[in-house]
Amino acid sequence: MSFIRFSRPHTVIGTVLSIVVLFLIAASLSDQQMVTLLPILGWTLLACLGANIYIVGLNQITDIDIDRINKPYLPLASGAISLQRAYWWIGVSLIIALAISLWQGKYLLLTVLLSLLLGTIYSLPPLRLKRYYFWAAFCIIAVRGLIVNLLLFLHLHYQINGITQIPSIIWLLTSIIFLFSMLIAWFKDMPDVEGDAQYQIKTLSIQLGTRKVLWIGTSLLLIAFMGLMLWAWLGNHLVNPWFFSGIHLIFMVSLYIMARRVQLSQQQSLARFYLSIWVLFFLEYITFGLANWIP
């Protein structure tokens, strides 16, 4: 149980979903039987999960004191596990990620190396980019928004189809996930203002105020959902427009209701809203995965 909490399950789910959806899109362009392609998916998942656990684990190791204020339930902050065990977990995860990616090819290796580099300088001094909201957001956006969707798709597409061309639906998926990644970087700090201020972590919520961050981010995502609905109907034959636009209408209504219900003075309310953005992030990937298969 401690390892599960240490791995930050919402990030693991996001990693797994993104890889599975990218795999399904690449597989839809192939004539091969799905079962023959599953080893490619399995090795890719193992490498990326190793990198994921290393990154979130390193962040917890460097943030123990801050997490005792902001996230006392995490296993290191609560004392449920020792620092030595945490180092062991991230060390094994790092070895798994590097070994598999070295074996599986250049695009997966590049994905893992860039993710590990950004995850490391995000947490470790002397750079410790998480102290600055622009660079903290840049690290998250670069990994979740760009590296995963583009380089990882290239890896899967090349392994499955022998092709290194990125189709238009991947560019669209990358665009919306880029925005989600930016908002996740903004919203993750809203419940943590007290601890971040004490340790001089200059987040956007501290710079602008929680209310402004909440509604600027929500407005951007609402506009993006409207844009996706419009795209589904205007000269596009890549997805089922009824399914795609209907799902995004539900997303819009749900997001607006959730934002209206946030109690800005309550840390738990802000944390719930942040996790709800992760849920929409998950559902966005699922929507693209299904839309690519529904006639």
Image: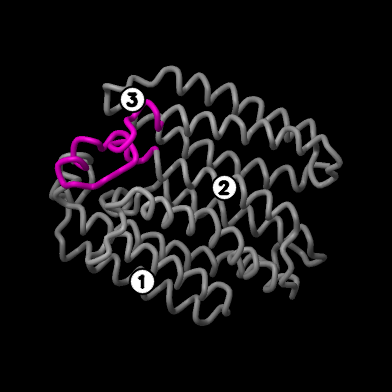
Mark 3 residue element: helix
Where, by quadrant of the figure, is residue 151 drawn? Answer: bottom right
The picture places residue 26, in percent across and down from the top left corner, at: 71, 61
Residue 191 falls inside the magenta stretch: yes
User: Which label was assigned to residue 269?
Assistant: 3
Q: Residue 5 has which mark?
A: none
Residue 2 image point, x, y percent? 25, 51
Range of residues picked out in magenta: 187-213
Q: Is residue 47 above or below residue 23?
A: below
Quadrant location, the C terminus = top right
Q: Does residue 18 appear to the left or right of 90 in the view shown?
A: right
Specify whether 129 is left or right of 239. Answer: left
Q: Earlier in the sequence, mark 2 or mark 3?
A: 2
In the rendered structure, are the residues bearing label 1 and label 3 in contact, judged by CB atoms less than 8 Å apart?
no
Q: Rounded to the nearest whole Å, what is the CA distance between mark 1 and mark 3?
A: 34 Å
Residues packed near mark 2 inside 10 Å, few (<14), some (14 to 19) or many (20 plus): many
What secondary structure is found at the residue carrying circle 1?
Answer: helix
- The type of residue carrying mark 3 is Ser
Label 3: few (<14), some (14–19) or many (≥20) C-alpha neighbours in 10 Å: some
Magenta region, mostly helix, strand or loop?
helix
Q: Could you tell me residue 27's position as x and y percent?
A: 73, 61
Q: Nearer the viewer, residue 169 or 290?
A: 169
Separation (CA) of disc 2 from disc 1: 25 Å
Mark sitting on residue 94: 1
- Residue identifier under label 2: 177
| Residue depicted at 69% across the width and 73% down the height | 158
Q: Position of residue 139 (x, y in %)?
A: 41, 57
State the image quarter where residue 283 is shown.
top right
- Left or right, 70 with respect to 106, comes to left
Spatial CA span between label 2 and label 3: 24 Å
